[in-house]
Image: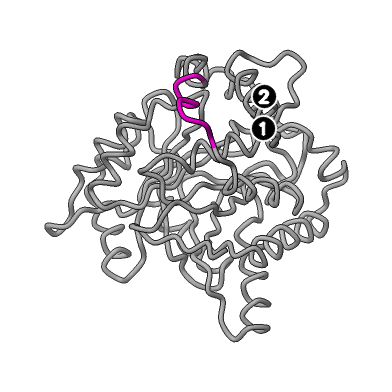
Amino acid sequence: MSQSAAVGDGPVVGVGLAAVGRPAYITPGRDRDLGRSRSVEELEADARSVLDAAYAAGVRYVDAARSYGLAERFLGGWLSTRADRLGSADVTVASKWGYAYVGGWRLDAEVHEVKDHSLDAFERQVEETRAALGRLPDVYQVHSLTPDSPALTDAALHRRLAGLRDGGTAVGFSTSGPRQADVVRRALTLEVGGARLFAVVQSTWNVLEPSAGPALAEARRAGLRVVVKEAVANGRLVGVEADPAPGVAAVLRLAGQLGVTPDQVAVAAALAQPWASVVLSGAVTPDQLRSNLGAARVDLPPGWLDDVLAAREQPEAYWRERSARAWT
């Protein structure tokens, strides 16, 4: 199955490297999936195994970020070997700037990433991204725009981003927090040189936190590529919680009725959104990736979304829970 990701095609699954580019992250089960040592060499091997499995399955969209530890370096190395083997690397590479990894490759770091949406940060990080990947990415996004971000109002930064846009890089932004919809709508109004600044939006959407959906539909109608992140709610929707929240329990019940895995229901829910272009898998093993890809074969019953969304969480509560999750 081809996993091309052009606007106008049906939604496809891509691979995000947030959980495999650095030793600690907020998803559960990392000791089981990655072990405890998680050296640079071990995580690079894990990342390459996921990327190899994704490519073999037809996935052609990969997402990284400056703050994902060494994810860009891992991806750049994998791309170079892929190109050596095939003569080309027909993969859409997306990355993000605006957060920096400061965890020192430690599981117990007090702080793992810091945010900086200034023009100076962009100028520094775009060159770091270019060096790590061996080229500019096809898509370069402001990482986690929120309503108070200076990246929404900095005209000098907008001009610099427009220079990337005019040079052939798709400029985008990702969102986080309970006011994602407000940020999406505001970003849609930004223009430089008479043309819309952003071509891609990447937002959290899942059955526990679907509040950005209407704004993402507006973005898709405006011609943006819409990328869904955290479709399994950073692991909450894979069925490992001892006392699942009502929304998680609803997904588990539906998965049992359909005879599929909970992650497949969660990813299938995102793929079913008519505005979605790409739904990212955050898999850290090839088996997890293959399970996520199985969502494309899940036949969700009529009325499923209303039933599951009846147990959705309030955005503020969802994001409080996410912020409180431990990095392990």
Sequence-earlier tag: 1 or 2: 2
Please state if 35 lies on the left or on the right of 47 as rendered: right
Segment tinted magenta in the rendering = 300-307
Q: Residue at x 60, y 13 (%)?
A: 246
260 left or right of 187?
A: right
Which percent across, then down, holds residue 242?
Answer: 77, 17
Going by the image, does 12 lie left or right of 198? Answer: right
Q: Nearer the viewer, residue 85 or 194?
A: 85
Image coordinates of residue 177 in percent, x first then y, are 44, 27
User: Amino acid type of disc 1?
Assistant: Pro
Residue at x 59% of width, y 53% of height: 15
Residue 292 belongs to magenta span: no
Q: What amino acid type should be assigned to the residue bearing mark 2? A: Leu
What label does residue 67 carry, if any? none
Q: Quadrant of the C terminus?
A: top right
Residue 83's quadrant in the figure? bottom right
Q: Marks 1 and 2, how far apart in space? A: 6 Å
